Amino acid sequence: MKFSRRSVLRGAIHGATIGMALPALDMFLNDNGVAYADGAKLPTRFGTYFWGLGLTPGRWVPAKAGTGWELTPELASLQGLENKVSIFSGFRVHLDGRPNLQHWTGQAAILCGIAAQRLGAFDLPSFDTAVAAQMGGGTRFRSVQITPFGNPKLSYSTDSGTSFNTPDATPLALYTRLFGEGFQDPNSDIWKPDPNVILRRSVLSAVSEQRKALMAAAPSSDRAKLDQYFTSVRTMEEQLAVELQRPAKAEACMVPKAPPESRPSGRIDVVNANNKLMADLMAMALACNQTKVFSVVHTSATSEAYLAGDSSIYHLHTHDEPLDDKLGYQVISSKLAELAFHGYSDFLRALDSVKEGDATLLDHSLVMGFSDTGYAKIHSTDNIPMFFGGGAGGRHKMGQHVVGNGDPVSRVSLTAQQLIGLPVGEFGVGGMKTSKTISEVVSA
Amino acid sequence: MSKRPRRLGRYAAFLLLAALPGFAATAAAHATRQPALAPAPLISATRRLTESEYRHSIDTLFGPDIVVNGRFEPERREQGLLAIGASLLSISASGFEQYYAIAKRISDQVLDDKHRARFAICKPGNPGGKDDACSEVFIRQYGRLLFRRPLRQDEIAGRVKLAAEGAEQARDYNAGLKLALTSLLTAPDFLFRVEVLEPDPAHQGAMRLDGYSRAARLSYLLWDTTPDEALLEAAARGDLQTDAGIEQQADRLLASPALEAGLRAFFSDMLEFDLIDVVTKDPQIYPKFSQEIAASSREETLRMLMNELLVRNSPYLDIFTTRTTYLNRALASIYQVPFVAADAWTPYTFPDTSDRSGILTDFSFLGVFSHPGRSSPTKRGAALREVFLCQPTPQPPANVDFSIVNDTKNPSLKTVRARLLAHAEDETCAGCHNKTDPLGLSLERFDSLGQHRTSENGDLIDVSAELDGKKFAGTQGLGALLRANPKVPACLVRDIYAYGVGHAPGADDKPYLQTQADAFVADNYRVKALLRRIVVSPTFFAPSPAAADNPPARTSAAGKALISANNTHQESRQRSPTR
């Protein structure tokens, strides 16, 4: 049984296809596509970081474009990271005649390059799974999904568009998965292959043997589901193959201690505290080579986060709260936006605090931060805030503010894929289809 | 009530292929070499096992002391039910990792020193090594119960080999068998309910559901678990292709105490009890709230439902008006009544003056369809329509400026009620809010925690409302309104049917559902009798309409509206800005 990368990278629904395996731009890759033309190693980590309800117009976009942009009220938490983050303002979703599905269209368009047809599903796989398929090999987990919000349904990462990868929803659950049973300390001097791992692989082989018979008998709709199931089995087989190899030493890896058990809560300060714990765990997961790809959902697109003691929730505030007469914006909503964005800054800071060689983990990563709306009050998908954090191994020319002037958000997604070394020449469908790299953030 | 037999349609190509000489020759070669290898069955549908079905299946097969411990892949509500969503879901990579871990823990327990004897249907000659004959007995027996059909020879052989490898490596027969059991528990044939077709001899060229798929439909609807030995035998004999055979099995299942598990699972799905697991309250506003209260409220409602619908065989409509419920200590505190019972749970009848009215005033409804810090008439109203009337509420338009009607500084709009009623004057909002808010406003004497109150911020709460020209007041008025609404029984009929067959009813199903609803009303709303009428009807065993026969409506405006409405049903509770 063999799964071609193309079958993973390519979602075909209603006859619409998205070609992701196109030749990379020459400016990026050398002849064999495994290293940059200048010989530098490919950056090895990629993450997406989503928070719900966007940011407030007039409160986040810096006045200055290019480098040297100033901190704005809602971006205040980036202080000290200005030189490691690029900002994308003015990019928008092209609906191509599709409805604006509230709190759904934005993230679908950014992750898949096409506005979704229906709520609850994407038309195509989210591109982080293509990244994971491409560069997630060689680690225990092809990718890891997390949410500090505590709701195990919060994930926008999907290989199929319909089944979403289950996130770990508490710090302890994440710790157990990453550093519990099956974890091997890469820096330990004692190592021998676990014979049980070989047997576990045999269990999976017995399962995958049924693939052909089932697939042949299934109608097309079920075939797609079964294909996803068998791909998941295959992913785990690959994971076990990794466990049979002696892990390479990882200088920055310090096996963390188990975090305390915590109750899920929507209170924004609790969410952010869990976010910090999970950021530290994820930083070590990356440093210890347990995974190279991750997706974070800080809060859902209809965020039920709330300020302690407030009887309303963030989502309701964005719709209910009147503009302040004097200030001209929604005061509580803006406060919550600032706190939600704080989650992203904290996450970057956690990666930046880990030294790897003469740089930091953040310098070797690219974390794309984004939201679902540009103005939650009216569900606008114009000017959705998007960010790149981290150096992508030197490929990201950090510290830029790029003004999109209504260009599709897919340009940002395309550029992210290219910065981390995917051989992708274009991304998106219809009006979102683009081959225009945002060259301002690409190191010469 | 009979349904048109399914036409060949998309199977024509397969049958054509089967008629080709080459195909036949290959099949014949297979047959000579391996007589037990039947041609691949035709699949009608695959339905991912719900967490509830998974847990109950393990419980049935291995006993309640085998702990199912792990995180299940989240389910998805589609058109009102998780059971419909289950037909659309697959298993993601991280989900499979978890299913594997759960399976391994089950195998380790089933075959450990403590439990092994119970399942040792064959004693190995050499406990310190492999015993193919013995492991085959185990795999054949438990494979049949887990896959809900006999295993094919190739499915057995692969696992016998696996058991041998494991036994030899660990020098332990049981270590090998654990691997074989894990592979059964992680197989698609267990994790998905695979519904299989066979030619229908009564209608040439048509296909029908095979006996094992029928057995599973009966068993999962009525017992929420895998078919037992008697059902599998009935399927093997062909009994489930006859009315008499189906009736016999249906009556047996309906008479069993296991019916309670089936009904609990159904109502947990219909009433959206999955939301109970994620409900949160702001501890600063509701310091009394705990997860124990949330979990207890699920049990409270289920106990009430079982008492009314199973034990007393009361009319379904009574669940909206009964004042008798079940309390434990945690619930007594939020319902503000003393708890003096020695048992953990005790029946309790609220006084007439309490405003309590059946399921409508349980925390499992009032608390779940509220915000963390306050009640929400719109959420409650929308949920009432969606859950009990099968009427999804569309999403609000994308670009409405809500602050116009929610300006708290407006001196004439001080209260929630006043601000909500302002929607009625805004044309864009009125269409939906006039349908949801009155229902919810009648429940305003209960806060986000389900605690009774008569005033809010010093003002008396007005619970009068008007819906479709009918005036009513408070919970009891709402209960009476629901009792009089013919959509209430029709919705239950629709939900039970859709839950059982795993897909949303189509236009073809309308006459059938109407006939069923009429019979339900004529029979004074007895749920057990309704279940029986549904499971003995041929329509209940019709193959699922495949995607090819039923492309998603995406061209016509009506189709779009339908999709949008249905999606709203799925997402609205989390996604639309219900106030």
Image: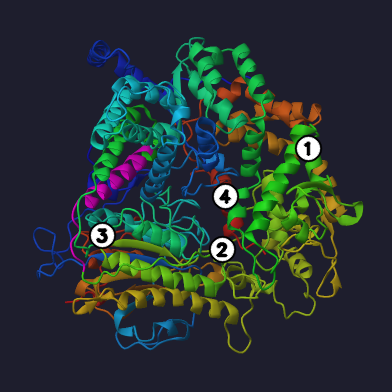
CA gap between label 2 and label 3 equals 30 Å
Residue A306 is inside the magenta segment: no
Can you say which quadrant of the picture contains the C terminus of chain A? bottom left
- Which numbered disc, 3 or 4, marks the residue closer to the eye? 4
Q: Residues within 10 Å of mark 3 (few under 14, many from 20)?
A: many
Q: Secondary structure at mark 2?
A: loop
Q: Secondary structure at mark 1?
A: helix
Q: Amino acid at mark 4?
A: Gln
CA gap between label 1 and label 2 equals 43 Å
**Which chain does the residue under circle 3 lie in?**
A
Q: Secondary structure at mark 3?
A: loop
Q: Secondary structure at mark 4?
A: helix
- Whether B260 is drawn above or below B96: the answer is above
CA gap between label 3 and label 4 equals 33 Å
Q: Residues within 10 Å of mark 2 (few under 14, many from 20)?
A: some
Q: Amino acid at mark 2?
A: Ala
Q: What range is drawn magenta here? A: A226-250
Residue at the disc numbered 2 = B398
Q: Amino acid at mark 3?
A: Glu
Residue at the disc numbered 3 = A426
CA gap between label 4 and label 1 equals 29 Å
In the image, what residue occupies the spot 26% across and 69% down?
A253
Residue at the disc numbered 1 = B308
Residue at the disc numbered 4 = B570
